[in-house]
Image (tube, rainbow, N blue to C red):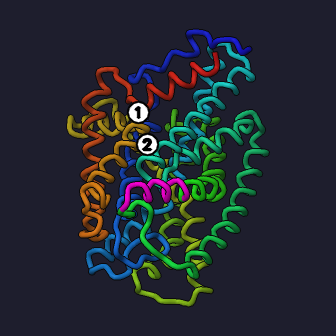
């Protein structure tokens, strides 16, 4: 029988004492998550590799092109890196409270197992493209790397990148030659939609795990050991290189697939599949680059010693609050998307294009930011975050 965690180890870090950069990054990246998911609810269109309509109008194609370059395949690695970063922060807090590694590992595994359960419920009720299950899976399988050497972590990340290429090449071939139809999010019958969501989630969770999550998760562990986002000032030069090089690689690597999915280039399958693989592979660099740039923004703000304008201060506080409520805000996005787009709810998914869907995604994100900004400063945690904490510590007693 395991020993109950000491009260100091179970106590949550006060919101005002949390590191700003990771929360700000999560808040901003939730916008990219919303943009990447909204068009998956649309129906009645032949779609490309990233799910955008191939018959969209000029505005739809511009929106799709911008999102392929800057959003798709970039937000997921970013969140995976922040997940690894956060597990190291949690480990450090538990260790400071006097817990041994076996005790800490039980907490991390319990948290990951409940996160996997959250992902299952998310897919069951709302969205097949859930990412919580992949994060829970990586936390269960790779928790030991929190204690491994930097060399082992980086080697494993390299192996993960190789696996990433292999799996994506196979998935790209499947996308080219398989018959295409609407996603489970656009299925009209509620019962059939539920079954299709679970089937899609069961396939996508291990795919996410093998493709985008593992390398970024491990690199997030490496970054957390150096406190790159907790203390961005001393690491300004490194963060500048990661941000500049990472985002540049993502944009250049995303160009071929952007041309393919916007019908500006119609190559053979032999050329389109490598473009798809390159887009996703370079997206890992883009996600890490985004995190680094946000760290630089926080460093600049800190060096200004509070002399920034009230508008910038309020915006930063609101975005950080959204990051503190990231699990709740992520799930709330799906609730709104189902209510607006699903055929058995609002039904808008059959009547709008990619540009309109992205506009709705921005409004949805703003709603979650406003909600978190109003409630988090009062010391209230998101309902999903509070539930995950209670379940985690309740299961390791």
In which quadrant of the rendered view does residue 104 lie?
Answer: top right
Q: Where residue 281 sits: x, y (%)?
A: 60, 65
Q: Is residue 361 left or right of residue 152?
A: left
102 is higher (above) or lower (below) than 349: above
Q: Any magenta on residue 197?
A: yes
Magenta part of the chain: 189-199
Q: Secondary structure at mark 1?
A: helix
75 is higher (above) or lower (below) than 42: above
- Mark 1 surroundings: few (<14), some (14-19) or many (≥20) residues within 10 A: many
| Identity of the residue drawn at 69% across and 12% down | 3
Q: Residues at badges 2 and 1 in contact (C-beta under 8 Å)?
A: yes
Q: Where residue 125 sits: x, y (%)?
A: 42, 46
Task: State which tag comes first along the sequence, 2 or 1.
Answer: 2
The reply to whether residue 243 is in sight is no
Q: Which mark is residue 279?
A: none
Camera-side residue: 206 or 215?
206
Q: Where residue 25 sits: x, y (%)?
A: 43, 43
Camera-side residue: 393 or 305?
393
- Mark 2 surroundings: few (<14), some (14-19) or many (≥20) residues within 10 A: many
Q: Any magenta on residue 253?
A: no
- Residue assigned mark 2: 26
């Amino acid at each position: 029988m395991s020993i109950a965690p000491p009260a100091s180890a179970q106590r949550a870090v006060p919101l005002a004492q949390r590191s700003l950069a990771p929360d700000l990054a999560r808040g901003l990246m939730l916008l990219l998550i919303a943009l990447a998911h909204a068009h998956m609810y649309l129906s009645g269109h032949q779609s490309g590799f990233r799910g955008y309509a191939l018959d969209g109008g000029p505005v739809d194609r511009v929106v799709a092109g911008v999102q392929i370059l800057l959003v798709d395949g970039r937000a997921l690695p970013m969140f995976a890196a922040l997940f690894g970063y956060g597990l190291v922060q949690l480990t450090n807090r538990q260790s400071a409270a006097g817990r041994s590694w076996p005790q800490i590992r039980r907490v991390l595994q319990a948290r990951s197992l409940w996160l996997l359960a959250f992902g299952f419920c998310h897919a069951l009720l709302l969205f097949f493209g859930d990412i919580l299950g992949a994060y829970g899976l990586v936390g269960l399988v790779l928790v030991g790397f929190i204690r491994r050497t930097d060399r082992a972590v980086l080697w494993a990340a390299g192996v993960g990148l190789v696996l990433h290429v292999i799996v994506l090449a196979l998935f790209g071939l499947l996308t080219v030659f398989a018959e295409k139809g609407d996603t489970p999010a656009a299925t009209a019958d509620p019962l059939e939609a539920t079954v299709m969501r679970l089937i899609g989630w069961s396939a996508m969770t291990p795919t996410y795990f093998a493709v985008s999550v593992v390398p970024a998760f491990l690199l997030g562990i490496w970054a957390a050991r150096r406190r790159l986002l907790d203390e961005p000032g001393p690491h300004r030069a490194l963060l500048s290189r990661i941000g500049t090089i990472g985002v540049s690689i993502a944009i250049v690597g995303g160009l071929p697939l952007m041309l393919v999915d916007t019908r500006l280039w119609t190559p053979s399958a032999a050329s389109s599949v490598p473009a798809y693989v390159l887009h996703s592979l370079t997206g890992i660099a883009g996600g890490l680059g985004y995190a680094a740039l946000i760290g630089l923004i926080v460093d600049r703000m800190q060096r200004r010693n509070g002399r920034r304008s009230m508008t910038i201060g309020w915006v930063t506080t609101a975005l950080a609050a959204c990051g503190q409520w990231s699990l709740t805000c992520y799930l709330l996005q799906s609730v709104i998307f189902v209510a607006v787009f699903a055929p058995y709810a609002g039904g808008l998914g059959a009547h709008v294009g990619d540009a309109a869907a992205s506009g709705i995604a921005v409004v949805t994100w703003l709603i979650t930011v406003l909600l978190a900004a109003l409630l988090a400063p009062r010391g209230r945690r998101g309902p999903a975050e509070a539930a995950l904490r209670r379940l985690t510590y309740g299961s390791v007693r």
